[in-house]
Structures are given as structure tokens and as C-alpha cells.
Amino acid sequence: MEGQMLPASALLTILGFCFSLAITRKMQLYSLKTRQALEKPSLAEWVDAADCVVTTAFMLVLAVLCVVGTHNLWSLHSLEGRWEMSDPSIEWFLSLYVTRMALHLPILFITTQDNKGMLAMMTTHHVLSAACFGYGLTTGRMHFWGALAGCCEVTSVPLNLLFALQALAPDDAIKTSTALTGLLTWLSFIVFRLMLFPFWLWQFWVDITHYPEKTWEQVTVVERYVYPAVALLLLALSTTWFIPMTTKLLEAVGLKG
């Protein structure tokens, strides 16, 4: 079954994006930048709209899988559960995530070609996170840590829903939905990124300092140093993203000029 997960995940990812391209091709699209109706969307605008729609559904699936998997292993209350064991939901999460990040790179180049800073940041995010999760698939170890980090994708659900709504409808029609999804994104960032990654790093430190012979001494250099480094990088990126998000939220509620 494990050997079939990556091909199946790639097929599901491709089919999902193609379906989204097909349905958005028939719909009135709106610019995410100017918020004006697009009479003749460019390739980048069309792909961006389709990506927002399919990513909303895809991230919802990933969020459910990693939250369930994290809960299942954490509820074992054991070192083995965190370092040696896995769960079917986590294996599917890792497979879907790796294929998604790899296949999303060409889309990223199309949709962010005018924003080199965002392109560089998101490419770094995709490559490093996919490499770590892919490495975890090959070793079969530390799946709990991958799923725990993956819980950050809970924030991607309301965020991408917000983008999808903006791509498919004018502002006047989605004022309430925009406010709700914006608030949910902001609140979820606090819990599932700004609090989650410090907890990840703290629990990792507790395990390796209290039980080094069963943790630190049993894993590779990549698992010792790269995994926590990526968690730290994701915390830094999340903090960077949270600042403008907070500014926009304050502006939306009239607390900032």
C-alpha cells in the first residue's frame, strides 16, 4: 500500500487541479490585486484562481489527516509513538503533501512571477518542507513530528477560502465572508503556527535531552538538525506573514488608519 501512495497522491493532485481549471474557465473571475472583474483573464490570473479553489479543498484534506494522525500518536503517551510509530492518516498526509509541493512549483512560478520576493520565499518553503517530509517517508521514523508540523496547514484552509472567494466574486457580495475568513485565518495563525512551532521545538528538546539513547542517538544527521531547523524557519516565516495579516485585520475593523 505504501508504494502506491505517492503515485495515487500525484494522480489525485493533478486531477484536482485540472478539474479546478475547467470550472474556473467557465466562471467570471476577479483580480486579487485590483478587485476588478476580469473580462479576459491572463494565464497567470486564470491559474491563480484555479489554484485558490483547489488548494482550499486540498488543504482541508491535509489538515484533517495530520490532526487525526497527530492525535492518534500523541494519545499513546509514549516516546515510541513520537519517534518510531506511524499512522495511516499520517502516511497519506506525507504522500499528498510531498506530491503537492513538488507539482505546485510550476504553478508557483506562473502565479508569482511578478513578485520575486514571494516566489523565493514560497519556493524555499515548498522545497525544504517537501524534502523533510519525503525523507520521513523513506525512513519510516518521526512521523509524529511531521504530522505535528503539518497541523500548521489548518491555517491554509480559511486563508485559501478567502482567496478563492475574492477570485470568484466581487467585494460587495462577500463582505461578511471576507471578514469571517480573515478573522479565522488570523486566529488560526496564533494557535497553529505561532504557538505550534514553539511547542514542536520544546517537545523535541525535552525528548532528546531526557531520552538521548532512544532519540538523538538513533536518528540521522538530517533528523537531528534539519528537522528542527525547518520548524524554526517555518516559525520565522509564519511570524513574517503574521505582521501584514494583523495590519490588514486592524485596517478592516477600523483600528488602523
Image (tube, rainbow, N blue to C red):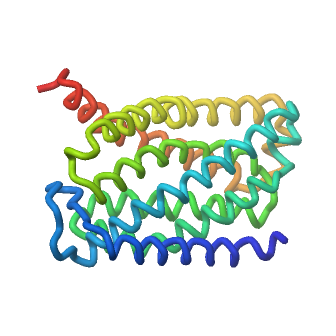
Number of callouts: 0
Closer to the camera in the image, 59 or 142? 59
The residue depicted at 27 percent of the width and 78 percent of the height is 43
Closer to the camera in the image, 19 or 85? 19
Q: Position of residue 114 (x, y in %)?
A: 21, 67
The quarter holding residue 149 reads: top right
The residue depicted at 86 percent of the width and 36 percent of the height is 79
Q: Quadrant of the N terminus?
A: bottom right
Residue sitting at the far top = 255
The residue depicted at 77 percent of the width and 33 percent of the height is 207
Q: Quadrant of the C terminus?
A: top left
Q: Position of residue 237 (x, y in %)?
A: 41, 45
Closer to the camera in the image, 42 or 237? 42
Q: Position of residue 81 (x, y in %)?
A: 85, 41
Image height of 158 relative to 30, above or below: above
Image height of 59 relative to 232, above or below: below
With 91 as the anchor, is 149 left or right in this view? left
Q: Position of residue 139 (x, y in %)?
A: 79, 62
With 166 as the anchor, is 146 left or right in this view? right
Image height of 155 relative to 110, above or below: above
The residue depicted at 61 percent of the width and 73 percent of the height is 12
